[in-house]
């Protein structure tokens, strides 16, 4: 049974159904939502079933599927999966399941939103499962398409600048990766597996062109100075939680690329430049964290949180130790789910503020007990309290950073602490009864369904804190 191929195809087939459905304000709209939810639910079930086929005690690719694509020149497509990539697949698809169930039915352009969401899920699954250089490139380049659609539909008054910036970075990154992949293909006269990229035996200018092409291609997808402008233009002002989720996951595209190509395969002549990059990463973290502390918008604080943690994982990838991969995987698994729920909780609060004509967050949670409980728990989990795998695994990652470089470790800790303080400060303001206004009593709390889903997600993360892969049977 082609399990890996099905993981890619199911969301794309679901996208076809949502795209072709006739849309009206009542019956057809419900069909679009239901199709999306059942598609992603089937995807999550298939991923868990595939997880059960793997040996969780083994490292490396365990399940491989090969498909012939072109006879001349011969190009065979490889799909492969290991425990780390399965964790990413599960967290991404589970987060989109939460997003689809909890999405407000009053959302504008739901057909465009849900179709682009399913396309993005299918392409991102393909990117994670790609085990050869050509399919890896094809999914990398095509992942920009759904986000361009979403920016066009939900970008607001600044969408023109966001589209221009993202298009430039996207095209440049895709071209750089294409150059590197083409040079590798010509050298080997074949479509090689990703895990053999370290055996290229390049030298001179070719070595620099290939590896720096790969480097800047992945950087173009990440919120690192000076490449962060496209994501800051979208995420710091984006009010639609699914668009926020898609944009944040684009950053993980670059991180995943580094994890597949960089740590154990990059030659020493290129690896010597890694400390310079680590310095840029930590300066970007600190800069964003300090802006976050002075910013009053909770949405921007969430953007700063996602940026800081994404860069923490990236610094962990670049450490000269090879034992952090699974720790980073467990942290990312938790981080994606927490970021998704926080985005939806903030969207709910923003919608209530808009209905009540409120201009600040002071006391807004006083009349929304379910929202208050969920936001409090997920903020505490997000900043690393010992109730999810984020605690232990981030502790290990940061410890390795300290062992590698004391100053780098201190700056990383300062950045994360500043983001945590900013989150707690905003939570304190929202729960402060002194700031509550009379019209807050008219606010609408989270629905019982949303509340149960969010709390159940936190319970699942707590089980993962006790036993990381408790769901594997």
Image: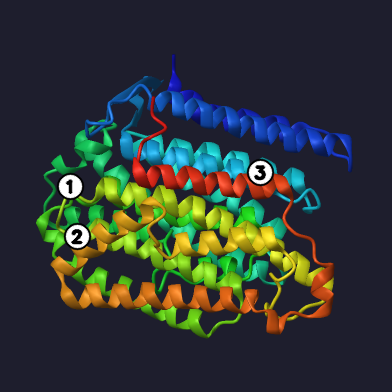
User: Where is 66 relative to 392, above or below?
Assistant: above
Residue 281: x and y, percent? 32, 71
State if disc 2 and disc 1 touch (CB < 8 Å). no
Q: Which residue is mark 2?
A: 319
Residue at numbered disc 3: 100
Inter-mark Cα distance, 2 to 3: 37 Å
Residue appearing at x 67%, y 35% in the figure: 36
Please name whichever residue, 259 or 187, is drawn nearer the observer in this view of the structure. 259
Asked whether, in this view, residue 296 is left or right of residue 313, the answer is: right
Q: Secondary structure at mark 1?
A: loop
128 in relation to 444, above or below: above
For label 2, the crowd category at 10 Å Cα-Cα, with few meaning under 14, some 14 to 19 and many 20 or more, is many
Q: Earlier in the sequence, mark 1 or mark 2?
A: 1
Give the mark nearest the N terminus, 2 or 3.
Answer: 3
Residue on which the image places disc 1: 265
Disc marking residue 71: none
Contact between marks 1 and 3 (CB within 8 A): the answer is no
Q: Position of residue 442 (x, y in %)?
A: 84, 68
Q: Nearer the viewer, mark 1 or mark 3?
A: 3
If you read the primary sequence from the N terminus, does the residue marked by circle 1 or circle 3 appear first? 3
Element marked by disc 3 = helix
Q: Residue at x 54, y 27 (%)?
A: 9
In which image quadrant can residue 120 be found?
top right
Q: Nearer the viewer, mark 2 or mark 3?
A: 3
């Amino acid at each position: 049974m082609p399990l890996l191929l099905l993981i890619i195809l199911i969301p794309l087939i679901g996208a076809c159904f949502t795209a072709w459905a006739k849309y009206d304000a009542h019956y057809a709209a419900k069909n679009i939502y239901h199709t999306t939810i059942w598609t992603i639910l089937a995807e999550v079930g298939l991923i868990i079933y595939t997880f059960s086929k793997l040996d969780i005690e083994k490292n490396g690719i365990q399940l491989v599927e090969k498909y012939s694509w072109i006879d001349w020149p011969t190009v065979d497509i490889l799909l492969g999966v290991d425990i780390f990539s399965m964790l990413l697949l599960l967290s991404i698809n589970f987060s989109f399941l939460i997003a689809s169930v909890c999405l407000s039915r009053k959302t504008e352009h739901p057909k465009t939103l849900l179709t682009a969401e399913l396309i993005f899920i299918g392409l991102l699954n393909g990117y994670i499962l790609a085990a050869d250089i050509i399919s890896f490139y094809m999914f990398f380049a095509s992942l920009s398409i759904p986000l361009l659609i979403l920016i066009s539909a939900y970008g607001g008054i600044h969408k023109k600048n966001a589209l221009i910036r993202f298009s430039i970075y996207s095209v440049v990154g895709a071209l750089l990766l294409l150059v590197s992949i083409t040079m590798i293909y010509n050298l080997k006269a074949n479509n090689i597996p990703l895990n053999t990229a370290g055996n290229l035996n390049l030298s001179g200018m070719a070595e620099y062109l290939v590896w720096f092409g790969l480097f800047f291609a992945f950087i173009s997808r990440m919120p690192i100075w000076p490449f962060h402008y496209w994501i800051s233009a979208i995420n710091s002002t984006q009010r639609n939680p699914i668009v926020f989720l898609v944009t944040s996951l684009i950053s993980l595209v670059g991180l995943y690329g580094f994890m597949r190509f960089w740590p154990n395969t990059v030659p020493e002549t290129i690896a010597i430049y890694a400390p310079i990059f680590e310095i840029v990463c930590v300066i970007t973290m600190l800069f964003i964290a300090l802006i976050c502390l002075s910013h009053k918008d909770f949405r921007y604080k969430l953007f700063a949180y996602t940026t800081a943690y994404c860069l923490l994982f990236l610094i962990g990838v670049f450490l000269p130790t090879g034992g952090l991969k699974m720790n980073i995987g467990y942290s990312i698994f938790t981080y994606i789910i927490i970021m998704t729920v926080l985005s939806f909780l903030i969207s709910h609060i923003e919608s209530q503020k808009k209905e009540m004509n409120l201009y600040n967050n002071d006391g807004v949670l006083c009349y929304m007990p379910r929202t208050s409980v969920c936001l409090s728990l997920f903020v505490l989990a997000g900043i690393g309290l010992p109730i999810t795998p984020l605690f232990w695994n981030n502790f290990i990652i940061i410890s390795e950073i300290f062992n590698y470089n004391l100053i780098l470790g201190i700056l990383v800790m300062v950045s994360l602490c500043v983001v945590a303080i900013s989150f707690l400060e905003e939570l304190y303001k929202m729960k402060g009864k002194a700031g509550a206004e009379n019209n807050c009593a008219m606010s609408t709390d989270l629905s019982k369904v949303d509340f149960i889903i969010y709390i159940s997600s936190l319970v699942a993360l707590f089980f993962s804190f006790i036993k990381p892969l408790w769901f594997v049977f």
